[in-house]
Amino acid sequence: MSQPSAIRGDCKVTCNRKLPSADVCGELVIMSVENDKYYGLDQIASDVWRRIGDGTCLTQLCDEVAACYQGPREDIERDLLRLLTQMRDYGLLQIHA
Amino acid sequence: MRQAYDSWLCGWRVASDVALPDLMPWTGDNRPADLQIRVGSVPEHLPGAVQYGPLIQLGARAMCRFAVPGVATYLIENARTVTIAPDSDAGSAEVRVFLLGTVFGILCHQRGLLPLHASCVRIEDHAVAFCGPSGAGKSTLAAGFESQGYPILSDDVCVIDTAAPGGPVVWPSFPRIKLWRDAIDRFAFSTEGLERTRPTMEKYQVRTHRTFDIRPAPLAAVYYLRETREGEAEGISQMRGLTAVRDTCNSVYRRRLGRSLGSPEAMLSAVGSLCERIPILRLGRGRNFSKIPSMVKDIAGMHAGVCL
């Protein structure tokens, strides 16, 4: 089986809008009807999800997040990449090369 | 044609061909029936229907056919009419068990209400619901409340209007609780004259009509009841975010069927709004029910005088 490719800075990232979601006290819960699972995003991940919306790229997202949250940019970029990869693997995001 | 029986079910006026002794009699205004229950024939196949599992067909225009071999086939149309084609006696306890179980759940989903697989009691002017997997002790705990003078609003299917002005409201369903023989003995109910839920089961339908109150009640909390594992602490803890939503979604009565009848978005939105406004709590209990009186006291104490 082939490994999913790494997310590059210029890859377009979009939320999987087919998945229903609910905002509960600032935290998003996303439901995958297909596999009857629920995914919870904490407040920062929920903020990232809203920023991704209908499309952005990793570089732009990183710029936005770095402007809002304190921390070295390389740490933010690494954490974002980890989060986006996890979200993609769960089917919450679509990545267009 | 005027139907013989006029009953009350979570605020709906129910006109029925068959006696429904589980329900309260209608005492409201002279409005037309909100729900009609007839005895008649049900087609083998609904036109253009999608098969949902082995027993259910979902047809066009909110038609739904539910067949229970050896008991009855039910046809639900537009959330307003139920036709029962019984295999034997239309008024039997078995026919009513499925009518007031799965068919009732389908009607709730079709009407945009949120049915939880829960028992529910009234503490002062508020409703408190107890969810949990089958065998968790929902009905037994509700019977514990009833024995201490707290009326039962519903057993098995707790009907919530999440869109009610002012917050989620529970509509009492009917004055009946299903209890296993050991629970009946524990609370000293008599089994004399009680119907069994199924002829081969030691589970009985206990009527609670003396304390039943048809007024809807604002929902104060939902407890998720489960038996603790070894080493786990008993007691109450708050659930938030994902766990609150997931466990509440998993407690929706006939949830997969409900998603097909409505939409997954609508169901998640209803549950999300519930979790935002109402405490969702985990209630861990030990292996036996010896602590029910103290659980009742603690929970009643928490919700007495609650003003939301």
Image (tube, rainbow, N blue to C red):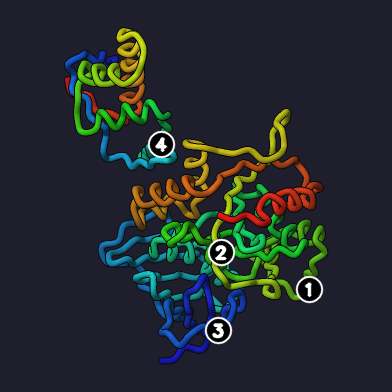
Q: Are marks 4 and 3 on the same chain?
A: no
Which residue is drawn at the image coordinates 41% and 52% (left, top)?
B270
Q: Tell me the quarter of the picture where residue B208 sits.
A: bottom right
Which residue is drawn at the image coordinates 70% and 31% (left, top)?
B232
Q: Are marks 1 and 3 on the same chain?
A: yes
Which residue is drawn at the image coordinates 24% and 17% (left, top)?
A63
**Any mark on residue B27, and which?**
3
Q: Is residue B274 above or below residue A76?
A: below
Distance between the Cα atoms at labels 1 and 4? 53 Å
Q: Marks 1 and 2: which is nearer the front?
A: 2
Tell me residue B130's x, y (percent). 61, 52
Q: Amino acid at mark 4?
A: Gly
Distance between the Cα atoms at labels 4 and 2? 28 Å
Q: Confirm or deny contact between disc 2 and disc 3 (CB under 8 A).
A: no
Provide the residue designation for mark 4.
A26
Distance between the Cα atoms at labels 1 and 3? 28 Å
Provide the residue designation for mark 1.
B192
Q: Amino acid at mark 1?
A: Glu
